[in-house]
Image (tube, rainbow, N blue to C red):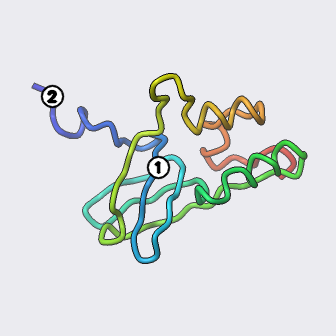
Amino acid sequence: MMSSETSSPFLPGTLVLVTLSVPREKFWGAILSLSAAGISMRGCELASFEDCVALIKSGEGFTPGAVFFPMHRVERIEVDASVNGLPSLAERFAAQTGVDVDQMLSGAPGPGA
């Protein structure tokens, strides 16, 4: 039998979409840590996703922020995966920018940064 830690899909490095409350917003990125206190991530607000893609495509670069959200704000965490033939946000990002998402979200300086 596997422990709950090894069977969880929400391990550090997993790309996720987090829905937050008060104020309502969505954040896309890689989990840095997840605990009863909250979730630490590196990424960007979903509302800024296309702007981030445009910055990288233009050569200006983008450095994703590391943020912490307390668990009382977290409504939902979902793995960023392709569904019914629709590409995941990570797949869209890589296809549009040519940048490896894992490398960008590792905290290494991005192209043009």
Whether label 1 touches label 2, CB < 8 Å? no
Residue 19, given in percent of the width and then of the height, sits at: 42, 59
- Out of 78 and 68, give the one closest to the viewer: 78
When the figure is inspected, residue 28 is found, relative to residue 20, above or below; the finding is above
Callout 2: SS? loop
From the viewer's perspective, is the residue at label 1 or at label 2 nearer? 1
Residue 70, given in percent of the width and then of the height, sits at: 36, 70
When the figure is inspected, residue 21 is found, relative to residue 95, above or below; the finding is below
When the figure is inspected, residue 28 is found, relative to residue 21, above or below; the finding is above
The quarter of the rendered structure image containing the N terminus is top left
Amino acid identity at mark 1: Leu
Q: Is residue 105 left or right of residue 6?
A: right
Crowding at label 1, few (<14), some or many (≥20) Cα neighbours within 10 Å?
many
Residue at the spot 46% in from the left edge and 45% down from the top edge: 16
- Rendered image: mark on residue 38: none
- Which residue in the structure is indicated by mark 1? 17
Q: Is residue 104 left or right of residue 57?
A: left
Residue 106, given in percent of the width and then of the height, sits at: 60, 44
Residue at the spot 46% in from the left edge and 24% down from the top edge: 84
Callout 1: SS? strand
Residue 72, given in percent of the width and then of the height, sits at: 30, 71
Residue at the spot 61% in from the left edge and 45% down from the top edge: 105
